[in-house]
Image (cartoon, grey):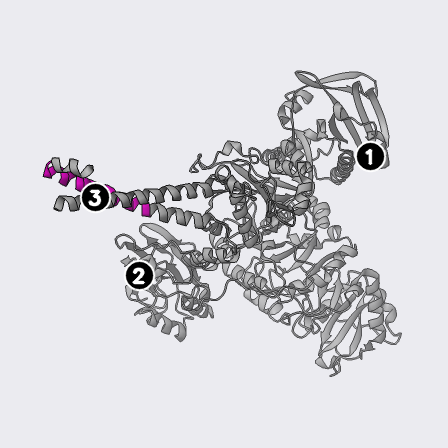
Amino acid sequence: MSRINKNVVLALLTLTSSAFLLFQLYYYKHYLSTKNGAGLSKSKGSRIGFDSTQWRAVKKFIMLTSNQNVPVFLIDPLVLELINKNFEQVKNTSQGSISQCTFFCVPRDFTAFALQYHLWKNEEGWFRIAENMGFQCLKIESKDPRLDGIDSLSGTEIPLHYICKLATHAIHLVVFHERSGNYLWHGHLRLKEHIDRKFVPFRKLQFGRYPGAFDRPELQQVTLDGLEVLIPKDPMHFVEEVPHSRFIECRYKEARAFFQQYLDDNTVEAMAFRKSAKELLQLAAKTLNKLGVPFWLSSGTCLGWYRQCNIIPYSKDVDLGIFIRDYKSDIILAFQDAGLPLKHKFGKVEDSLELSFQGKDDVKLDIFFFYEETDHVWNGGTQAKTGKKFKYLFPKFTLCWTEFVDMKVRVPCETLEYIEANYGTQT
Amino acid sequence: MEGTKEIKVSNRRIQEHWTGAVVFLLVTVIVNIKLILDTRRAISEANEDPEPEQDYDEVLGRLEPPRRRGSGPRRVLDVEVYSSRSKVYVAVDGTTVLEDEAREQGRGIHVIVLNQATGHVMAKRVFDTYSPHEDEAMVLFLNMVAPGRVLICTVKDEGSFHLKDTAKALLRSLGSQAGPALGWRDTWAFVGRKGGPVLGEKHSKSPALSSWGDPVLLKTDVPLSSAEEAECHWADTELNRRRRRFCSKVEGYGSVCSCKDPTPIEFSPDPLPDNKVLKVPVAVIAGNRPNYLYRMLRSLLSAQGVSPQMITVFIDGYYEEPMDVVALFGLRGIQHTPISIKNARVSQHYKASLTATFNLFPEAKFAVVLEEDLDIAVDFFSFLSQSIHLLEEDDSLYCISAWNDQGYEHTAEDPALLYRVETMPGLGWVLRRSLYKEELEPKWPTPEKLWDWDMWMRMPEQRRGRECIIPDVSRSYHFGIVGLNMNGYFHEAYFKKHKFNTVPGVQLRNVDSLKKEAYEVEVHRLLSEAEVLDHSKNPCEDSFLPDTEGHTYVAFIRMEKDDDFTTWTQLAKCLHIWDLDVRGNHRGLWRLFRKKNHFLVVGVPASPYSVKKPPSVTPIFLEPPPKEEGAPGAAEQT
């Protein structure tokens, strides 16, 4: 009897366990479908793809930032490009129902947002609340480069990047800081030693490999995949800036050492020259930017930036470089309209072009055009008095942003090599 | 089928089977339940929340503090205190935390406060109780120390001469035996817990008037209490987290660290409607006077229209305590390594601070410059918001300042009234970016020049004929006593009776009449309607002005050239206003109030307003007193 009883019990238990197994299967499937979304939930009908981890992370992040008044805007190049392609859709879907997740449902590791630090009022509690909402957050801080130019100041560190991970997707929040010269700056994402290098695939980040400089974007509000997001008014302009955004600081420490050795020239004449040279540079930059011609500091002006972070008072002119491929025939006219008449023109567009404009107070603006060959770059110089021609060879270089006399301008990133090619190694 | 097979198998085996199956099933059940719970939670978390607000509240509710509970074994501090005629020192666990053997300084009672849980030095003070009033400061300080803290006192040289009964009673209440009986040139060392037991005391009486007590060395053990006991149980908020950090480090800030009813550290004053200075950065220039900084920041953060994120405190030197004060209020602090000495150092600190301010706020056209020893009026930003457009529209202006050099209790009256003056008062002022970047910064005096920055800014080469806008009633109050250029007497004479506006939201009158041309019209109007005073009377006498109210009077004094201030200086002296150099003049005209009447003084013939002098009136001339030595030293403002 007891044996049969036991068998009955056993059978019952097996039944229960099977029932539980079924439960388990059901729940597991349900769990999977909500968590990993896209593939499994397509059958659900109209809201296609809205269960992706990216969409969920972005949604939660936007919820958090709007609750906490963190003024973030979207800068993710991929999403901005998608927006550009589907701009009509962005406009049309601002009301009504959305049928398909277009922007935030591409399988990716990161979505990049940005924040203007000076508009952020309550930094303090934000982090903790993000973590309580389920984000795992990493904050990258560093010293404030805006204090570097000043001797011996040390301030509180400023936040440069936040990376907040929700499940397998991470939000990269790039903190933009205002700099002198009306531009926004973000820092280098440098991992401190104790940081877990596997926290997110850092190598795939779109921002932070180098410090970067951007024009201050105007913003607009759009609805993407049912989420209210701020994006740059001209998304493509921003996207185009990204690959050329690398920024290098002036070498303030070395400049201070230089001045300790040679003392700065603070005579009235030196100050007057610096003032007019600065104004001339500002005018030239404004004119060229309007034309869309990229330029960089060259020769003496570049040396002044590199060696003393300022205009060399005895240099008498302002020197700029432009790639000949960016040459536009209306440059001369544009400068004339800006009040800078052409003084000399050497060479021609095909060969050794150099333009020289007359600024105020006897300060000259020299523009050298650079010709790219396979393994080097060159420009031609002509001595005004003798008409003698020179050819200067430079190793290939790329351009970086920097800050110079309260302006955002470009310099060759490989500045020392450039200057040495120009002046020899005796700088 | 199963059953029939089972029967054939031995009893034992079935038993095994059965147990195995049950265990297996139980495990399955547990795993299942756990899985269900887990997935349920994960789903509900991951699901979009229809009400974000609710989500937010929930999050806030979950902000439980990670409290550190109970620490290891109770530790003991080994404290040494030495008191003698020429040297005092205090060592805690072998580390010297106080050592003073300098000659002719550090006289009196040295007080050190230790954190009872960590042993950290929270405050270090010396009260020269040989001199008057210092004992009052000591009483004030000791009363502010939180109960439970470890107090260490030691006397150097002499500490009893002006140690009055109140102070002695306080020492008695601390449990000291020798303190209340401290005599002339006695040595004394004391260690005790505030409100708790005395942990050690030594005392040596001076045998005679001309000699000192023997040096005493007190060695004692101080048991440390747990961190729990040392801390207050404030509600766990972001603000209190800051407060806790501050209060566990420093001592002597009174009720901000009170456990029961701590004073607020966030003030949220009313916003200012149409605030024109909301985005103007505020630079607070500070040294190592953390108590002043504390008082200053409190008043600044209470001013209507303040925006804390625009404030930066620049600390001259690597001092911790001022930085702690800055962190308490959640503000940005920047430290500056000293480069040079005395005045030149202050001047370099100013330069670095101003440059940094304009770098940090590249869009700002102006900066407000404040110092750590100022009280800020409740309508400070309102005053600036109403007047700042003048700096944009009028090139002939150098600055806007909140301080009227001549605005004393008896000479200032009208909070809605503004003046134009040729002197730069400082003490809470607005600087234009272009002025700084284009003119001042490039030629700022180098360290070896040893110049005062404010004196330099007042020089004609810099000021170039430009003027500052000031209010009749100052919007800042200079409370600093222990500064570089300050001593008690000087402060009493020149700053204490300064008028300070306490009325909120004052509407300034006729702000646009302060522009260059308009102001001339205004001055001419005033002079035309002014009643000429009786010039035969002594201008120093009270009766020089009639006992009226609301009238405008004018007096003419002799002023041969633009820089002849002989009579003015004498008049300023007898009116008890600023007389150490010339302040507050506008083209040979001074404007102030006497007995609630507007009182104008015109220097004849140098002032262009001399034309308003009736021919019959002879300008007043006051003889300077015969040269005598000993005018108050250190006679410089700021």
- Quarter holding residue A286: top right
Tag 2: amino acid:
Asp
Residue drawn where x is 39% and y is 46% of the image: B39
Q: Are labels 3 and 2 on one chain?
A: no
Q: Give, as a three-letter code, the residue at label 1.
A: Gly
Query: Could you tell me residue B379's position as x and y percent?
Result: 65, 66
Give the residue pinned by disc 2.
B214
Have a look at marks 3 and 1 and say if they share a chain.
Answer: yes
- Mark 3 or 1: in front is 3
> Is mark 3 in CB contact (under 8 Å) with mark 1?
no
| Residue B318 seen anywhere in this rendered image of the structure | yes
Q: Please provide percent x and percent y for residue B585.
A: 75, 64
- Residue at (73% x, 45% y) in the render: B438
In this rendering, would A128 be left or right of A413?
left
| Residue farthest to the right, as pictured | B615
Quarter of the picture holding the N terminus of chain B = top left
Query: For numbered disc 1, what is the local secondary structure?
Result: loop
Horizontal and vertical percent position of residue A253: 58, 36
Location of mark 3 (residue): A10
Q: Is residue B23 magenta?
A: yes
Q: Is residue B456 above or below residue B7?
A: below
Can you identify the residue that label 1 sits on? A359
| Label 3 Cα neighbours within 10 Å, binned few <14 / some 14-19 / many ≥20 | some
Q: Nearer the viewer, mark 3 or mark 2?
A: 3
